[in-house]
Image (cartoon, grey):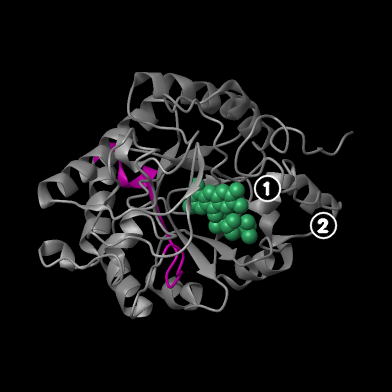
Amino acid sequence: MNSPLLAPYHGPVLRLPNRAAMAPMTRARADDATGVPTPIMTEYYTQRAAAGLIVSEGIWPHRLGKGGPGVPGLTGPAHAEGWRQVTRAVHAAGGRIFAQLWHVGRVSHPDILGGERPVAPSAVAISQGSVFTASGPQDYVIPRELPAAEVAEIVEAHAAAARVAMDAGFDGIEISAAYGYLIAQFLSDSANLRTDGYADHVRFAIEVVEAVAAAVGADRTALRVSPGNPLHDIVESDPAARYHRLLDALDGMGLAYLHVVQSSGRYAALEGLRPRWSGTLMATFDGPEPGGLGRAEEAVRSGLADVYAFGRLFLANPDLPRRIATGSPLNPLRENGMYEGGTEGYLDYPRLTG
Ligand SMILES: Cc1cc2nc3c(=O)[nH]c(=O)nc-3n(C[C@H](O)[C@H](O)[C@H](O)COP(=O)(O)O)c2cc1C
């Protein structure tokens, strides 16, 4: 089938064999005590090596950035060794893989952080929903407000984790600034009530991007944003103005790509940001149903996006590009094993044979 998703992409930095990327998805199969990846994770990513680019699940760059049991880390040699198994196998299967650095800030719990209180721009708790811990769902706690010196440490932790990622063989870094986690908390009006220099909502995001780019190269650095997305009590009074300002600071750095999550019924981020981004733009539509092929094809065909990242469709269809090429039916998503567990719902989605 003649899908624009299957055309190779030769951008200013990235060269990809197709435009169907795999979006970052937390699957919580790392060793919980250490955050070291387990062997089933190597198999999971290798099954999906036909993606134009794999973006890994979110990985904590600092011990206080962990968002749940079984979430992997990237802070030391044991993490590097575990991830090296993944990157080697993905490369041997012909794929490319970026590591998503994911500090969750206040979207955590002392039970996940060895008894320590989660950190955030300000001491404001998430008022609704619950956080999943080893003993089940719990209410969010009031986070500890980060002193400026500790903000600088977290910026440096992102750079250090990016260096570990390079040592582990990743092709690049995607920094998570989406979905209400730490960087998105700084970007918001609801979680960032600071009166110091970080009252400038975009400052922390820019500092993290600059630090990671200085550590591993701008051409290996990417950023994921979800303008206007309300997840985790996020309010952005004027997403257009805020993200335009962020892009004004970052466009021109020569980053690998900007990953824009466009949320249904919210600010039309792709239309707003595309004209302001001269580099590669990766898109994901976020809504109750998995992002559909038709909409993704239209985004690429129209030039709104250069590359499209599928989450749930890639979770359920390890060989998604081949299914697009042959017009084959897509496997349905199963809830079982989606966010945690072992091999079930993880390694057992069927691939086309022959
Ligand atoms: C199981 C699961 C885990 C996810 N984990 C992450 C994550 O670690 N980091 C992130 O930025 N987005 C995460 N997401 C969001 C996806 O990357 C994507 O933006 C969202 O699922 C919408 O795309 P889709 O409709 O193609 O699934 C996750 C989504 C799912 C379904």
Secondary structure beneath label 2: loop
Instruction: Name which quarter of the figure residue 309 lies in.
Output: bottom right
Quadrant, the N terminus: bottom right
* Segment tinted magenta in the rendering: 215-232
Amino acid beneath label 1: Phe
Residue at disc 1, CB closer than 8 Å to ligand 1: yes
Amino acid beneath label 2: Met
Near-viewer residue (161 or 340): 340
129 magenta-colored:
no
Q: Are marks 1 and 2 in contact (CB under 8 Å)?
A: no
Residue 38 placement (x, y as % from top left): 55, 23
Residue depicted at x 30% and y 47%: 118
Crowd band around label 1 with a 10 angstrom C-alpha radius: few (<14), some (14–19), many (20+): many
Quadrant, the C terminus: top right
In the figure, 227 relative to 76: above or below? below
Label 1 sits on residue: 314
227 magenta-colored:
yes
Locate residue 327 relative to residue 173 in the image: left or right. right
Residue 187 placement (x, y as % from top left): 30, 65
**Res. 334 in view:** yes
The answer for how far apart the CA atoms under marks 1 and 2 are is 18 Å
